[in-house]
Amino acid sequence: MSRSGRIILKAVQWAVRLACLALALGLSMGGPVPGVLARAFPGLSPLVAVASTVAQRRWYLGLYWFGPPLAVLLLALWKGRLFCRWICPAGTVYAAGSKLSLNKRILRVRLNAYLLWTIVGASMIAAPLLLLLDPLSTFNRITPLLTGTYTIASLVPGLLLPLFLLLGFIQPMIWCASICPLGYLFGLCRSARSRPKETFTNSRRQILTGLLIGLPAGTVARLLLFSREAYKQTPILPPGAGDMEKFAAACTRCYACVDACPDRLIRIRPPLDRAVGQWFQPELHYVDVESAVEYGSCPEYCNLCTQVCPAGALTPVSLERKQRLQIGVAKVVREACLAWQDEEDCSVCQEVCPYQAIDLDMEGSRARPVVNPDVCRGCGACYSNCPAIRAGKAILVTGVRRQKQLDA
Amino acid sequence: MAADRRHARDGQFDRRRFLGMSIVGGGVALLGGKGGLAAEKKADVWVIHGTDKAKLMQAAMKVIADNGGFGKAAKKLTLKVNAAWYSTPDEGGNTHPQLVDTFLKGCKDRGIKQIVIPEHPVQPANRTFPRSGIEAVAKANGARMIDMRSDDKLFKEVKIPKAKRLTQALVTRDVLETDALVNMPVAKHHGSTGLTMAMKNWLGSVKDRRFLHRNDLHQCIADFGTFIKPTWCIVDATRIMLDRGPKGPSKNMKKPDLLIVSADQVAVDAYTATLFPKATAARAKYIQMAAAMKLGCADLSAMAIHKIEAS
């Protein structure tokens, strides 16, 4: 290729890269685009698709969302790491940073192969550890910082991208060349197609090492991090999360659900307790505990977050099923309640309940609210609308360990 | 005057009270001189029956036109519907859109230039306004729905000197600053107050509803009556929830097929309450409180009730 030809190609490449970068940001930040597209970029990763399918032992991708990661995988079989150099938004950020690099080597070993096989091994034990290293999830994690849904805690996972951008100033492409398990997978696909035997021989040690780390690590993680015993509290998880332990393990922390939630109720769990497995997971918060800022409640007409999870940690739930899905249970705190304690005529919780899960106790001189836990979905309408202030909110919602469909 | 007699009997008829009564008495006499015998003028309540909602509202508009209309030079009209809930028209959580539609058409025919429909919804307006069906008819008739959640500047701070509990509040500016004010709620069961009809509907025009729930809700509702004076109240009782209100959906629905029209918001509530079970109606204490504050008539026997069949 001539010199000018190369320059034009470079220019086109950067134009495509920047367009993809802008697209990835735009889609995850929402605005005029449909909220479901928050999953478009994190959902491109075949690593997430394969590892999550293995971990959950089920084919969770629907007809449409299975297409993009398959296309990316086919692209890798054909052209290796073309995706990294043309499409990957994280790759674009790192490549741009590396243009100004000091060219010093701080990481001499390549971890990418080991990381990939560790992820595969751990996924076989249903605890896909390190899947959060997927670069597309990593890139998407930046959005909560931009849209203002972050707490201080969410800065930590959100800062992975800037961190490797900074490290790239020292050692160019440190992430892409030495760490990225997805990029390694792409390269592997290409070489496995053209030289299958050699590829296998060369990567035998890496596969073995990775599996030998991943299988026991997954087992230990399931016992210690993602077990019922590890979780003292039951946070309210977005609808479709199913089992609390499964969700904590399956979630890649891409925060597509955080981006998708129109009411910005899905917030990131801070790393402040012993439930390490649940750290940084997206949870539903109706009221900010510290600032008492009210975010709202999970309304009966919305199931968007269930549609956007690229890892199947949240499974799609139809609106009809969402309206029967119990994600938490409310409880009246009688000592704080205006009707039970303060002799006021207040039944706001009953009034706003979309599911009629709050009955009125008519004994005595005024109506007093009583939650029916067999009907309560845990949507938080009562909680966020409760006008009591003397002793705090008079109705609270806690999560359930396992979300379930209710009959009533 | 029964109270006076009792006081006199008890020997507690003091001077100040006597003076107060004289002033009220003088006022009544003055009013009487102006428009006939005011003391004997009964509160007019029109009860219009019919299954066709357009005809119902046309009949209501005729009643209004025959009884002073919206005022001579009325250019701007503020309509307070109920569109606070994510509820379909048949579920009865909001005012029926067909009634609103006919009303808006009637207003245009009578020369009202500007109609605003401000609502402070309980659920987000982008869901409740379309779901109620009112957004569509408002748009079709060139009226403007205002989401009071969208901007704090839409509220105006008012002092309420005659109030017992709600002595000040942030209230929808358009409710305060308009030529004609029409209250068009839907009647339904209500958890906190037993029933919600006309007077309770003003909660959709106040910013901090929660204050009311903490400070004797019934008294606060009555306090509204001391400073919000609707030109007309038109209560939608075409279908009413008998329980599980105000949001519903309720399995216990009734179809009275009625519109209750009056300029007296206490009277319109007192009459509408008779459509509900007695125990529920008895919980709506604000009606008696408002009557005790002389804001209107709660005594059915003291009302002039005009029954009309709309066909």
Image: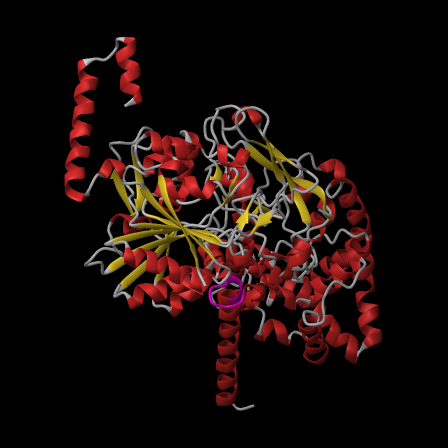
Residue B226 in view in this figure: yes
Residue A98 in view in this figure: no
Residue A33: within the magenta?
Answer: yes
Where B6 falls versus A87 (above or below)?
above
Residue B25: within the magenta?
Answer: no
Check the image and tell me how it is coloured: secondary structure
Quadrant of the rendering where the C terminus of chain B is positioned: bottom left
Q: Nearer the viewer, residue B51 or A145?
A: B51
Q: Quadrant of residue A175?
A: bottom right
Residue A206 placement (x, y as % from top left): 78, 61
Q: Is residue B45 left or right of residue A133?
A: left
Question: Magenta span covers which residues?
Answer: A27-34
Where B171 falls versus A310 (above or below)?
above
Taking the spot 71% from the left edge, 70% from the top edge, the residue there is A66
Residue A262 placement (x, y as % from top left): 52, 56
Principal secondary structure, stretch drawn in magenta = loop
Residue A61 placement (x, y as % from top left): 72, 65
Q: Nearer the viewer, residue A322 or B38?
A: B38
Quadrant of the rendering where the N terminus of chain B is positioned: top left
Taking the spot 30% from the left edge, 68% from the top edge, the residue there is B109
Taking the spot 72% from the left edge, 57% from the top edge, the residue there is A115
Residue B272 placement (x, y as % from top left): 45, 44
Q: Nearer the viewer, residue B197 or A310?
A: B197
Q: Looking at the image, which residue sits at the far top? A: B11
Where A216 falls versus A333 (above or below)?
below
Q: Is residue A279 left or right of residue B283?
A: right
Q: Looking at the image, how many numbered discs can be counted on the residues?
A: 0
